[in-house]
Image (cartoon, rainbow, N blue to C red):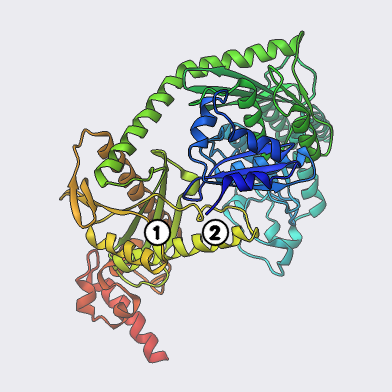
Amino acid sequence: MFDIEEELKKLPDKPGVYIMKDKNEEIIYVGKAISLRKRVRQYFQSGKNNPPKVNAMVKHIFEFEYIMVDNEVEALILEANLIKKHKPKYNILLRDDKQYPYIKVTLNEKYPRVMKTRQVLKDGGRYFGPYPSVYAVNDVIEILRNIYPLRTCNRNLSSYTKKTRPCLNFYMGRCLGPCQGENVNEEQYMGMVNEVLMYLNGKEDKLIGIIEDKMKEASKNLDFEEAAKYRDQINSLNLLHEKQKIESTTNLVDQDIIGMARGIKEVCIQIFFIRNGKIVGREHFILEDTFEEDRKEILSSFIKQFYIGASYIPREIIIEEEIQDMEAISKWLGEKKGTKINILIPKRGDKVGLIDMVRKNALDMLNKYGDRFLKKAMENQKALEELKSTLGISNDLNRIEAFDISNISGVESVGSMVVFEKGESKKSDYRRFRIRTIVGADDYGSMEEILTRRFTRGLEEKRLMNENKIEVKGFSNFPDLIMMDGGKGQVNVAIRVLKNLNLDIPVCGLVKDDFHKTRGIIYNNKEISLNEDSLGFKLIYRVQEEAHRFAISYHRSLRTKRMFKSELDDIKGIGEKRKVELLKHFQSIEKIKKASIEELSEVKGMNKLAAEELYNHFNKKKEGE
């Protein structure tokens, strides 16, 4: 039994991070302190002067842990990482699943490519961004590819020993075709890459000057076709330059401007990104403000959570008022970037105007979306409470996972897992599964496989996390409720898997009508009907539709990608449609090989001539063997 009074006496008078847990050992709050002894004890003293959040939280604290560090900056970094990792209930959370796009130049490979990515890796490539607008990234890449015929394929050209058949871009003049080996001048190719890097580094004018010199040289040599090509490149770059050019009133130091507006139960934080003196984009974040936190604490929490995962930090961060831990945050960001970072609170001049502009935009965004956000959050909460009451579950349904299987007569079976947190889909935690052990149309077997894989991996992640060997990957977050896209059979499969793994998670099934639409829930072997106009029904209907959509989209993508690559390829008279129908009809290639001409002719879309061609193909092959 955890004795809080005894543990409080053991607290050291040193800097560190403290972790509050409830009776289920769930982390409900993470904080940092210069003195762990003084800070943690404050929570358990008289609650008269405590803010409402602290009083609400203390009632649920069952035990606490702490981690000692050497200084305040280390405590700040550890606190931010733990909040991001565990998302505790009583911390201010930046609930943002956006993964901003970057432009990557793959300098780590021979004949580099220019591509869009959402992951920044330490792989030797050059990354530019993040860009708040994916459309801007697509525009930049498209225009650069029109100007420079760089490759787009992912072939490993460093180990190529022979020519391969080039892709369509080579024949269209949009790629020099480095896969053709000696036909490409590597120095010329890298010259184009360096010009791309020049542009992405913000040296547009210098690049345009270089291309102008090339145009003049070509014109001087009477090569007007080449000169026209350079002229078009200049026009494209100027067009792109103008699209991005919204001049700020500041100097050319990279800046982030952060402003905040407050509603009744929510806060909007607006951030403008200024790069090389231009406003290149903006983003807003709506945060819940249930306990009416201090403005300084909200801004401080936002900055720590926003920049903990950022690959780029500007030289200046401009905010409207002083925040908690300002000196420590500035020092931490400086260490992260490798150069001094200034957090500024302007009192006069252009920067005050910038802060006013950003704050007004935050207020406008709050007026537009704040009420909608609050209304949606309240509806989701009511729907979850209704679902809890209907099922008789005592724990909060913060996380729901729904599973579905998709196949066409057993061909290319796939599984999907969708996740809803607090009633909203969390796409970053969605997972797809290709069925490995089941052959044919066996939905129960397929479901057992994907559930076993999902929760076995989750348990393994939890074990490794406890040993501090890995970070959270997504599987280690277990749901409060599992929804199966099916009735009693599917529910019993899930219960069996959980029992084998010693897991206790409620499982319900979604019962369908004759039109494959949800009509109720199966729970504890009972069918429960819900009013179709109720919020609870609308929530489970959304979950079921999303699970089905996600599974179907994955199945279609596999079919499109592979088009059932098999021994049926390249047989005269057997196209993609006939191939699909044959696989649907016979279930396997082996059965197709054994079929007679008459049996083959019976398949939808087949005729006798095609059946004879197919029959002869396999039987002549046997004779040849």
User: Left of 294 or right of it: where is 405?
Assistant: left
**Mark 2 — residue?**
462
User: Left of 79 or right of it: where is 287?
Assistant: left
Secondary structure of residue under mark 2:
helix
Q: Residue 481's spot in the image, x, y percent? A: 36, 50
Q: Residue at x 42, y 56 (%)?
A: 560
User: Left of 495 or right of it: where is 340?
Assistant: right
Q: Residue 475's spot in the image, x, y percent? A: 50, 55
Q: Residue 63's spot in the image, x, y percent? A: 55, 47
Q: For the residues marked 2 and 1, what is the alpha-carbon distance in whole angstroms?
A: 34 Å
Q: In this orientation, which residue lies closer to the viewer: 480 or 554?
A: 480
**Mark 1 — residue?**
559
Q: Residue at x 56, y 45 (%)?
A: 86
Q: Give the mark, 2 or 1, whose residue is nearer the N terminus.
A: 2
Rendered view: 22 above or below 624? above
Q: Where residue 413 is drawn, which disc sits there? A: none
- Determine which quarter of the picture holds residue 538: top left
